[in-house]
């Protein structure tokens, strides 16, 4: 008989420990995969694109991605953080070898993060899981991480208010559900709109005004799952 989904994920949790991911670059002895406020000196993942120039270019892009991540999170000042998020996601769409790196960078910024930027990290994660999938090898590690987060452990241990913990748990549940969908569907061609990212960052719904032939109009709250037929 097939193992129940929850039980399978619980078992995976003890097997697919992030530090055991084969493509994770070995950390220094005094380093851990956890939240930081400064740029990274090296990418988190190992790259071998068969060409030294291409490999170096991807490593440079990986480090630039983390710098953009800090800007979106608010650790660095940027006038338009939504643009940074859009750039990160578009880089992932266009560069498949960079996708695990982006996921890992967000995971790292979630770990042991007790600052307000924790929610920003999870917001970024929701954008990633509906835009492009992780690699087949990294998928179970990410799935186990999400499952762990849905139980309010590790990533919420630094939060003191139950309301904040519940909000993160809810986001993690959405990410776990969306992960299977994007793995099956494959990467999208375009990043979420700046309006969607801005609404997510402000924790506000996206509103769409629909005008009718009698000159009246109605506003609808929309999300990425909404179909035109749902409005009719």
Image (cartoon, grey):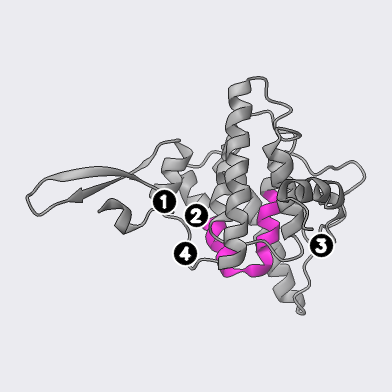
Magenta region, residue range: 86-105
Q: Could you say whether the residue bearing mark 3 is in a helix, strand or loop?
A: loop
> In the picture shown, does residue 50 fall above or below 180?
below
The answer for how far apart the CA atoms under marks 1 and 3 are is: 32 Å
Marks 1,3: beta carbons within 8 A: no
Can you identify the residue that label 3 sits on?
Answer: 23
**Circle 4 Cα neighbour tier, 10 Å, few/some/many (<14 / 14–19 / ≥20):** few
The total of numbered circles placed on residues is 4
Q: Percent position (x, y) of residue 221?
A: 34, 43
Left or right: 215, with 200 as reference point: left
Crowdedness of circle 2 by 10 Å Cα count: few (<14), some, many (20+)? Answer: many
Q: Secondary structure at mark 4?
A: loop
Instruction: Give the residue number, with chain letter if any, for mark 2.
Output: 86
Task: Quarter of the image for the C terminus: give it.
Answer: bottom left
Residue 190's label in the rendered image is 4
3 or 2: tag closer to the N-terminus: 3
Nearer to us in this view, 7 or 141: 7
Q: In the rendered structure, are the residues bearing label 3 and label 2 in contact, judged by CB atoms less than 8 Å apart?
A: no
Mark 3 surroundings within 10 Å by alpha-carbon count, few (fewer than 14), some (14 through 19), many (20 or more): some
User: Residue, x 77% and y 75% (percent of image)?
Assistant: 52
Q: Main secondary structure of the magenta part?
A: helix
Q: Which residue is mark 1?
A: 194
Using the image as rendered, state which of residue 14 and residue 119 is in the foreground.
14
Above or below, comparing residue 19 to residue 98 in the picture:
above
């Amino acid at each position: 008989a097939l193992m129940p989904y929850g039980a399978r994920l619980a078992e995976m949790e003890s097997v697919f420990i992030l530090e055991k991911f084969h493509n994770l670059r070995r950390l220094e002895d005094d380093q851990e995969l956890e939240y930081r406020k400064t740029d990274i000196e090296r990418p988190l993942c190992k790259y071998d694109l068969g060409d030294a120039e291409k490999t170096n270019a991807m490593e440079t892009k990986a480090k630039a991605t983390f710098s953009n991540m800090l800007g979106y999170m608010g650790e660095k000042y940027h006038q338009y953080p939504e643009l940074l998020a859009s750039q990160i996601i578009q880089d992932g769409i266009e560069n498949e070898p960079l996708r695990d790196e982006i996921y890992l960078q967000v995971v790292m910024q979630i770990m042991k993060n007790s600052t307000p930027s924790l929610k920003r990290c999870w917001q970024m994660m929701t954008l990633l899981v509906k835009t492009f999938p992780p690699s087949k090898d990294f998928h179970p590690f990410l799935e186990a991480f999400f499952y762990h987060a849905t139980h309010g452990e590790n990533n919420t241990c630094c939060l003191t208010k139950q309301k904040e913990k519940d909000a993160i748990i809810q986001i993690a549940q959405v990410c776990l559900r969306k992960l299977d969908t994007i793995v099956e569907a494959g990467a999208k061609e375009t990043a979420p709109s700046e309006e969607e990212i801005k609404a997510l960052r402000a924790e506000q719904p996206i509103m769409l005004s629909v005008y009718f032939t009698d000159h009246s109009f109605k506003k609808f709250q929309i999300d990425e799952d909404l179909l035109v037929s749902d409005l009719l």
